[in-house]
Image (cartoon, helix red, strand yellow):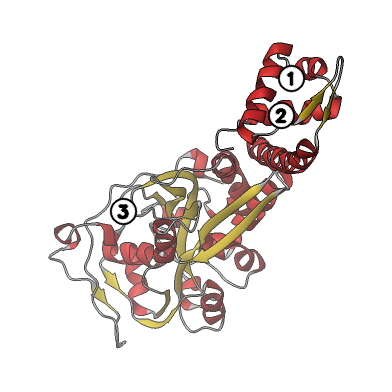
Amino acid sequence: MRNITLRQLRCFATAARTGSFARTAEELHLSPPAVSMQIKELEQQVGLPLFDRGARSVSLTVTGEYLLVHVKKVLATLKDAEDTVARFRGLDAGRLAVGMVSTAKYYLPQLLARFHAEHPGVEIKLLVGNREQLVAWMHDNECDLAVMGRPPQELATRAEPFAAHPHGVVAAPGHPLMQSRGLTPLALANYPFIVREPGSGTRAAMELFFAEQRIAPSYVMEMASNETIKQAVMAGMGLSFLSLHTVGLELATGRLATPAIEGLPLVRRWYVVHKLAKTLSPIAEALRYFILEHGEAHLAREFGALVATESPSRKAGRPRVDSGPSADERTAPERARATPPAKAKGRPGGAPLSAAKPMKTKPIGSANRR
């Protein structure tokens, strides 16, 4: 029975139901001789007759009745497979593993909720980690898509930008820097910072900014949680350099503030990323397209005021769109500079940072002004 075909099984099951080779031929859009040939070939494979043939009708033999039980199971399983494929084509079912950096949790779940409302049969598994963890997950094929601010250079990926990603210094409302206007980045060297852990995109963006400005503030605390950092800043423990998408609520309610520092915010990009060697399912492609299509507008609605039009205090250093490589992605000669960074005055622990070669910058276009 190794050479039995699906056509033979369909002809057999239909003939068993209709009791007629002629009606079977009509239903399956075949000729009566073709149906007779399919049944005959199946009987040859089985080695026993499956039908008792009458003048105008056919009926199953005992062997045929037993075989029909199994044929129905085979055809039902095939139908389930066809339905599954059809649902995939219609994007009504399936599973997705989506990775995101912890900074993206302030907006991506809402965007995924909108996608799920359009495709309620899709099951989404959300993986949250820092940039290094996301790269490892993509490498091991544990996530279909990743949303991050700094695409990997160490892995072949397709990275597509979909929205602006502003970073800046945040402080408690009563911090001394909030009493001044038109500050240069050099003013930051006198105050301690609470920073993200190495390996995070936020840490890389901060170190890039400090290196460009040739300053080296002291780090009094290192944390892997944006929420804990915000609480420490609100408690007056120091400043922090964060994605402004993580502090929208605190800025709106006055629990945190952003000092007017020339050259800030530093505007980078959000990317949707997937491993080039991984073939995306239709559902993953649909989500990728959904993020590219709706991500920017969603962020504009939620955080549009964070990338504001230039204020008088920022005339000398306008917010910038960073389209170049990050500090840790450059070569050592590019990072090295003869001018030493400014150290924190009177504060221990302000270890010098190697200053990066100034990056080409440009003012934020009208599309990024809110």
Q: Which residue is mark 2?
A: 10
Q: Amino acid at mark 3?
A: Gln
Of callouts 1 and 3, the N-terminal one: 1
Q: Closer to the camera, 223 or 369?
A: 223
**Is there CB contact under 8 Å for labels 1 and 3?**
no
The CA distance from mark 1 to mark 2 is 8 Å
Query: Marks 1/3: CA distance?
Result: 55 Å
Work out whether residue 254 or residue 45 is closer to the camera in this orientation and state it.
Answer: 45
Q: Residues within 10 Å of mark 2 (few under 14, many from 20)?
A: some
39 relative position to 360: left or right: right
SS type, badge 3: loop
Q: Is residue 61 left or right of residue 266?
A: right
CB contact under 8 Å: marks 1 and 2: yes
Q: Position of residue 339 (x, y in %)?
A: 15, 67
Q: Is residue 281 above or below residue 348?
A: above
| Quadrant location of the N terminus in the rendered image | top right
Pick whichever, 164 or 235, lies toward us: 164
Which residue in the structure is indicated by mark 1? 28
Q: Secondary structure at mark 1?
A: helix
Q: Position of residue 237 (x, y in %)?
A: 48, 84
User: What residue does disc 3 label?
Assistant: 153
